[in-house]
Image (cartoon, helix red, strand yellow):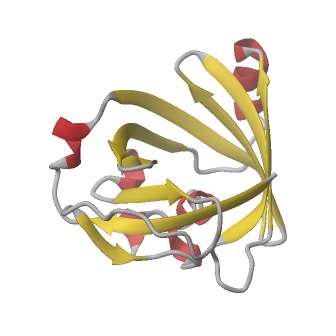
Amino acid sequence: MQEIERKFLVTSRAYQQQAFKRTRIAQGFLNSHKERTVRVRITDEKGFLTVKGKSSSSGLSRFEWEKEIALDEAKALLQLCEPGQIEKTRFYINLGRHIFEVDEFHEENQGLTIAEVELTSEDEEFEKPDWLGEEVTGDVKYYNSMLSKQPYSKW
């Protein structure tokens, strides 16, 4: 239940042609405390409840627990979330042994695009696509829980 991932800004839209799947995501936070977040997400007509712990000092890893829940329950829980829901389109791209998830944010976070890659260890090597830009791993302002409070359009 340990999540290890690296995050990057994206420099072009070339990833869109490389994607094997895309999905629309709506999510909110029941709790966005820096020690833990509790997220409700709807994607592809499925609901999920996720608990994430505090990031490691490197920002690369943290505890993550996720459970699929009924769609009607997820919709009801979204109504209880803190102000500032996140809307985004996620693109999935195979590259080498990894799958990159690229999020194009909408609404108040329009214009922000972030790529994430999950790893099995903090020092795992991975192939970097041409459209990968500056690394923002561990930069709290790029966490979805922070984007819900301080959207990209207000930076």
Residue 79 visible? The answer is no
Q: Position of residue 135 (x, y in %)?
A: 40, 77
Which of 98 and 75 lies nearest the eye of the viewer?
98
- Quadrant for the C terminus, please: bottom left
Q: Position of residue 107 (x, y in %)?
A: 38, 46
**Vertical placement of residue 72 versus 28, above or below:** above
Which of 123 and 101 lies nearest the eye of the viewer?
123
Q: Position of residue 99 (x, y in %)?
A: 44, 45
Q: Position of residue 29 (x, y in %)?
A: 71, 48
**Vertical placement of residue 90 versus 147, above or below:** above
* Residue 40 position by quadrant: top right
Q: Is residue 70 left or right of residue 152?
A: right
Q: Is residue 134 left or right of residue 18?
A: right
Q: Residue at x 77, y 43 (%)?
A: 50
Which of 151 and 140 lies nearest the eye of the viewer?
140
**Vertical placement of residue 143 versus 39, above or below:** below
Q: How many marks?
A: 0
Residue 50 visible? The answer is yes
Q: Residue at x 77, y 15 (%)?
A: 70
Q: Residue at x 36, y 42 (%)?
A: 94
**Vertical placement of residue 152 versus 64, above or below:** below
Q: Is residue 74 left or right of residue 95?
A: right
